[in-house]
Image (spheres, rainbow, N blue to C red):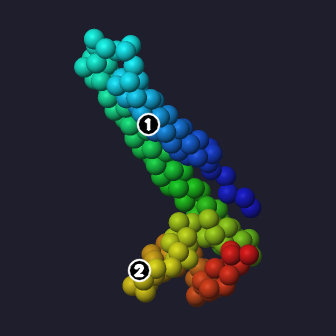
Amino acid sequence: MKEEAITNPNAEKVLRTIANIVLIAGSISFAIAILLLFTSDLFKGFRLIAAIFVCSQFIYAIAVWGTLTVLSNISNKLNDENNRGNWESKFLILILSGDKTEAKKLLFAIILSSNELVMVLSGGREDFHKEKVNEFYTRFGEHLKLVDINEVDFELIRSLKAK
């Protein structure tokens, strides 16, 4: 059973890419404008006005970049919340109908794409790792118990993901 996103999962990637392009293009145009401003005779009598215009364009590029980044984060958050509700409903239906095998498959698919698992596998200090494991079990512990799994072997998952 494949989990379908309510929002387009590529939307976040597109928004992040556009945001990065806006930031890079704004920075490059700012550098070129500053170079032209101080090396060209084109703006000789209007250097102050041109400098204000150039700075405002750079500020505009940063504002657009910030806005697109926020939109990307909001879209990502909405997608996570929508998917969480969808998969949990499907999971409970599978459990209640007695189909634990399909429920496990669905649960493992969600776990493997979860931020909680990514954070557990990222390593770090021992206390950080324990905190992330606790967050993982807070989110998925009850679901795992419903499919008769008491503990997840994170080292096995780490080694399989590395291949």
Residue 33, given in percent of the width and then of the height, sits at: 41, 26
The residue pinned by badge 1 equals: 27
Taking 30 as reference, is 8 left or right? right
Within 10 Å of the Cα at label 1, are there few (<14), some (14-19), or many (20+) other Cα atoms? some
Q: Residue at x 72, y 58 (%)?
A: 2
Residue type of the residue flagged with mark 1: Ser
Q: How far across and how far down the image is residue 115, in percent?
A: 53, 66
Q: Which residue lies furthest to the left in this view?
A: 48
- Front residue of this view, candidates 10 and 85: 10
Q: In this view, does 126 lie to the left or right of 148?
A: left
| Quadrant into which the C terminus falls | bottom right
Is 8 placed above or below 103 here?
above
Q: Residue at x 38, y 37 (%)?
A: 62
Q: What type is the residue that disc 2 sits on?
A: Phe
Residue at 58% x, 87% y is: 151
Residue 96 seen in the figure: no
Against 33, residue 28 (above or below) is below
Residue at image coords 46%, 49% = 73
Res. 1 in view: yes
Relative vertical location of residue 50 with respect to residue 121 in this rendering, above or below:
above
Q: Is mark 2 on a helix, strand or loop?
A: helix
Give the quarter of the figure containing the N terminus: bottom right
Spatial CA distance of label 2 from label 1 is: 36 Å
Q: Is mark 1 on a helix, strand or loop?
A: helix
Image position of 81 (left or right of 41): right
- Could you say which disc has been placed on residue 3 in the image? none
> Residue 128 has which mark?
2
**Which numbered disc, 2 or 1, marks the residue that appears first in the sequence?**
1
Which quarter of the picture shows residue 70? Answer: top left
Whole-percent x and y of residue 125? 42, 83
Sort mark 2 into few (<14), some (14-19) or many (20+) by Cα contacts within 10 Å. Answer: some
Above or below, 91 relative to 77 = below
